[in-house]
Image (spheres, grey):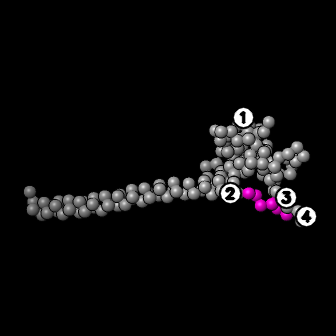
Amino acid sequence: MDPALLERITARRAELDELEAQLAKQLAEVRAERDELAVAERVFERVSEQIADECVSATSVPAQVGGRAVMLIPHRTSDVEENVLPPDYQRILAAVRQAAGPVMARQVGEMLGVDVNIRSKLEPLRGKLVRLVDRGWLRKLPDGRFTTRL
């Protein structure tokens, strides 16, 4: 065999070995970063859920109308009509009523045209549904589905 050819083969093999080592190092770095992103995503979801829960459970600050304090989402009583609710809450109630049975927040979002694949769009809707439950306008079943009051 030609010594020059053998030398070129040996040099190319060394280049490929070095490239393989670099790629292996890059792959390890990518995998480590992916793992860190997965942890960050889980932390973000937990914190987002906690914030949403805190926002929902926080007492509503009454608005001022004519110098008197009123709740934007009043408790449901026999003398309070649905038309006192803000329009978006009225649409939510209508969507739950139109459903064939109890619905998840995602289904209500789909009926209202909310992009339910984006968590930041779905969570405010879920908060409004829970607020309607807290005020007696809807019921929340143990499985997390929402339905109208009887």
Q: Amino acid at mark 2?
A: Cys
Numbered disc 2: secondary structure: helix
Span colored in magenta: 59-66
Circle 4 is placed at which residue position?
A: 66
| Residue depicted at 61% across the width and 49% down the height | 117
Q: Position of residue 46 (x, y in %)?
A: 56, 54
Q: Position of residue 131 (x, y in %)?
A: 73, 50
Q: Residues within 10 Å of mark 3 (few under 14, many from 20)?
A: some
Looking at the image, is mark 3 or mark 1 earlier in the sequence?
Answer: 3
| Residue depicted at 76% across the width and 43% down the height | 138
Q: Position of residue 85 (x, y in %)?
A: 83, 51
| Residue depicted at 30% across the width and 62% down the height | 22
Farthest residue to the bottom: give it: 67
Q: Amino acid at mark 4?
A: Gly
Circle 2 is placed at which residue position?
A: 55
Circle 3 is placed at which residue position?
A: 70
Q: Gap in Å between the C-alphas at discs 1 and 2?
A: 27 Å
> Is disc 1 in contact with disc 4, using a CB cutoff of under 8 Å?
no
Residue 122 vertical placement versus 7 (above, below): above
| Secondary structure that dominates the magenta span | loop
